C-alpha cells in the first residue's frame, strides 16, 4: 500500500487523516444551511449530495446509501476516487474549517459489546475482586443493548448525569468516565429468524467510527445487577463524525483469536491495526491499538443475529473498551486511576475521574506507508450537572 | 363509571373488549391494501385515516399523532366518542373479522423493566438460590434496554431461537418461555439532559398494550453476567394490536408502593387494576393482576430520563413480568413449572417450557360496572428452529 495522490494538496500530507486512500462519509452544513452528505479529502469536503441514485442523500444522512449494499458502495467509492485523483479536473470543495459536522447516520439501535480482554479482567478485579474473566467471556461475545437516542456527534457537550449513586444516595455522578471504543456501522440488515455467518456479517458492515461510551461508574455499580448497565451509560455516547469505509481499512485486517464455537469462526481477519489514543485537554493519557480486541465486529454482529434478532441499516455496534496490558494503555479512567486509588499525574494537576469543564478526546488512525487512514477526533466537553429539580428534593 | 352506549350494538355487550369507554388505537388493512389507522368499537373498526390534522395518519401508524401530545389526544378522543355514541348518525365501519391487524406504532426503542416483586423473588430463588430481592430492587426501577427490531404484533409466529445454551453447547433453546407484561407506549419525548418528574412522565404516556417478552432461559442464564440479558430476549417480543388509551383507564388507577427517593414519588396512582391471564392453547394456565407491580410506568419513565437520556415518541416500556404470590398466578413458565421441576398438568399432557406448535396467549381487561376496558389478545405460535446452517456446524 502506498499513498494515492490527489489534486487536493492537503490530502497528500502523510499526517493527514483523510488522504485519497480513506474517503470517509460525513454530514455537514455551512452557515446554518441544510445538512448535506460529504466525503472528507485532506482539509476539505466533497459535497456528494447530487451524486448517487436519485434521492439517496435527500434525508441528509447516509442511511439510504448504506442500505444499497456492497456493490453500490464499491461503485460510489470508485467514482469519488476518480473525481479526486491527481490529474482529474479540479472542482469546488467545502473547507472543513467552514463546515459544521453532524451525525453521519441515524442510529437505528445501539449495542455495546465487551470484547477488550484486559478491560474485562481489570473491571473484574476492581468490581468483583478477582482478575479473572466471567465464565462465559472466552465463549461468547458478551454485549448489551445500549440507548440509541443519546448517541451524539463529536463536539456535542455532555451534561454530567444525575442518578442513584448507591442506596439512598442521589446526585450528580462522582465517577464520570470514558470508554475508548470502535463503533461498527451496520449497512445492510438481516431478516427476522435468520442468523448470519461471520462472513456475511462482515459484508453487512459499512464502516467504522471512534466511539466514546461515556459511563457513570457509581450509577453503574449500583444498578447493574442483575440486568446490566442502564442509566450509568444512557446519558451520552459520542462518535467521530466521519464513517471510515471498511474498504479503506482492508490492508489493515488482523485475525481475531480463535473462537471455540464454529458459528464464530472467522474467514478473514476481522480486527484492524488501528492506533488509538486518549487525550484529557491537550495531554495524551493513554495509547493502545484496536488489535487488543478479542472479538471482531463481524463476530459480534453474527452473534447478535444468532437468535434470529433482525439487524437493520444504521445499527451501531460498540466494540467494548479497548485496553492494552499496561497502565498507560488502558481505555478508561476507571482503569487508568484504578478506581480512583492511583490518581493520574497531569501537567496541571491530578485526575481520578472526569471534572466539569474537562474535554476528553479520542483519536485513531491506521498507519500506512506514507499515509494514514484517520478517523478524525471524537471529543466531548463536560458540562456541570443541572440543579436538582424541586420534584427530586 | 358505567357503560357509555354506542350505536354499534356489539360495543354494548358487557363482555366486549371494546365498548365506547375504550376506543383503542390500531392499524389495519383489508385484502392486502394499505395500512390505515383505526379505532376499535365492538366487533368493528372506525377508519380514522381521514381525520385529525392533515397528514397525521399518512405513515400508516400512530406515531405522528402520538407526538401531538395530550391536548390533541383528548380532542380526538372526544371527537371519536361523539361519532360513535348512541344517537349519532350511523356510518360505515370495517368488521374486525375482515381486517388484518399490524403494529400500531413504530417502536423507537424498547426498554424492559423488572417491577414484578414476586417474579424477582422467584427468579432470585431459582437462579441465585435465595428468595430475596437484589440489594437495589426496592430503591431503583431496575431495567435494561431491549431490542426494538424484533417487537412484533400479536399473531406473528415466533421462531425458536438458536443460541449458546451453556459452555460449548450450541443449538435451539430447550427452555423457551413467556413473560406476561404490560407495555407502556411513550407519546411525547423529552430533551437530552433534562430529567422528567413522575407527574410529567405520566403525561407523556400515550397508552398501554399487553406485552409478551419471549425468553430463552438457557441462553439467558449463560449470557447474562455481567451485562444483562441479550440474545435470550432479542429474538421476539409480541404486543397486542390495540393501544388502550391512558384516558380509558383513568378510573382504574391504583397507587404504587411508596418509593424511598423523592424523584420517584407518585402524585397520582400509576398502577392499574387490570385482570390478566395466560393461555396455552385454549387452557388458562395463569391469572393475575397488574396491581402486583411495584413500580408504575410513570416511575419507570422518570427513572429512564434521570441521567438525561432523551425519551422519544414510540419508545416502548415493558413493565417486567407480572406474577402474583401463588403458583397459579405466575407470569412465566419458568415460575409456573419451577424451572422445569414441577411440570404443569394440562388437559392434554404436561408442560415445563414451550414446545414447537404451542400457541401462547395473553389476555387482559379492566372490569368496570357492566363494561370492560379490554386489550384484545397478545398471542404467538412457536415455529421449530431452523436447521443449523453449515457455517455453524
Image: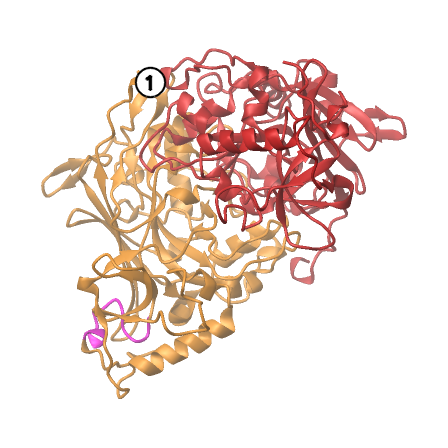
Chain colours: A orange, B red
Label 1 crowding class (10 Å Cα cut-off): few <14, some 14-19, many 20+?
Answer: few
Secondary structure category for the residue under label 1: helix
Residue drawn 51% across the image and 68% down it:
A69
For the N terminus of chain A, the image quarter is bottom left
Instruction: State the image coordinates of residue A386 (x, y, percent, origin top left).
Output: 25, 29
Q: Is residue B281 magenta?
A: no
A12 in magenta = yes
**Which residue is at the far right?**
B348
Q: How many marks?
A: 1
**Front residue of this view, candidates A72 and B245:** B245
Furthest-left residue in this view: A348
* Left or right position of A85 against B97: left
Q: Tell me: A205 left or right of B352.
A: left
Q: Disc 1 is attached to a residue of which chain?
A: A
Which segment is the magenta one? A10-22
Q: Quadrant of the C terminus of chain A?
A: top left
Location of mark 1 (residue):
A391
In this view, A42 is above or below A352: below
Camera-side residue of B198 and B372: B372
Dividing the picture into quarters, in which one does residue B305 lie? top left
Amino acid at each position: 500500500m502506498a499513498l494515492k495522490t490527489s489534486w487536493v494538496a492537503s490530502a497528500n500530507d502523510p499526517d493527514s487523516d483523510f488522504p485519497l486512500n480513506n474517503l470517509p462519509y460525513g454530514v455537514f452544513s455551512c452557515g446554518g444551511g441544510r445538512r448535506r452528505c460529504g466525503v472528507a479529502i485532506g482539509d476539505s469536503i466533497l459535497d456528494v449530495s447530487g451524486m448517487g441514485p436519485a434521492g439517496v442523500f435527500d434525508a441528509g444522512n447516509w442511511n439510504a446509501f448504506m442500505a444499497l449494499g456492497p456493490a453500490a458502495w464499491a461503485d460510489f467509492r470508485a467514482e469519488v476516487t476518480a473525481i479526486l485523483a491527481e490529474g482529474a479536473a479540479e472542482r469546488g470543495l467545502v473547507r472543513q474549517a467552514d463546515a459544521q459536522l453532524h451525525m453521519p447516520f441515524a442510529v437505528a439501535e445501539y449495542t455495546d459489546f465487551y470484547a477488550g480482554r484486559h478491560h474485562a479482567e481489570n473491571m473484574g478485579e476492581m468490581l468483583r475482586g478477582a482478575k479473572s474473566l466471567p465464565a462465559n467471556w472466552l465463549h461468547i461475545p458478551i454485549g448489551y443493548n445500549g440507548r440509541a437516542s443519546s448517541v451524539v456527534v463529536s463536539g456535542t457537550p455532555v451534561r454530567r448525569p444525575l442518578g442513584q449513586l448507591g442506596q439512598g444516595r442521589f446526585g450528580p455522578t462522582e465517577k464520570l468516565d470514558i470508554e475508548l471504543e470502535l463503533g461498527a456501522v451496520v449497512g445492510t440488515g438481516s431478516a427476522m429468524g435468520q442468523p448470519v455467518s461471520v462472513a456475511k456479517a462482515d459484508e453487512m458492515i459499512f464502516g467504522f467510527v471512534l466511539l466514546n461510551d461515556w459511563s457513570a461508574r457509581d450509577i453503574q455499580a449500583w444498578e447493574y445487577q442483575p440486568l446490566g448497565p442502564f442509566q450509568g451509560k444512557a446519558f451520552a455516547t459520542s462518535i467521530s463524525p466521519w464513517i471510515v469505509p471498511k474498504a479503506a481499512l482492508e490492508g489493515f485486517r488482523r485475525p481475531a483469536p480463535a473462537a471455540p464455537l464454529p458459528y464464530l469462526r472467522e474467514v478473514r481477519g476481522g480486527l484492524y491495526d488501528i492506533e488509538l489514543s486518549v487525550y484529557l485537554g491537550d495531554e495524551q493519557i493513554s495509547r493502545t491499538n484496536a488489535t487488543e480486541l478479542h472479538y471482531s465486529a463481524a463476530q459480534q454482529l453474527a452473534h447478535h443475529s444468532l437468535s434470529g434478532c433482525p439487524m437493520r441499516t444504521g445499527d451501531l455496534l460498540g466494540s467494548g473498551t479497548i485496553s492494552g496490558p499496561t497502565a498507560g494503555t488502558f481505555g478508561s479512567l476507571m482503569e487508568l486511576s484504578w478506581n480512583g486509588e492511583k490518581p493520574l499525574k497531569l501537567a496541571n494537576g491530578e485526575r481520578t475521574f472526569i471534572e466539569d469543564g474537562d474535554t476528553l478526546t479520542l483519536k485513531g488512525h491506521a498507519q500506512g506507508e506514507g499515509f494514514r487512514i484517520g478517523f478524525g477526533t471524537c471529543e466531548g466537553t463536560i458540562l456541570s450537572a443541572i440543579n436538582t429539580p424541586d420534584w427530586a428534593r
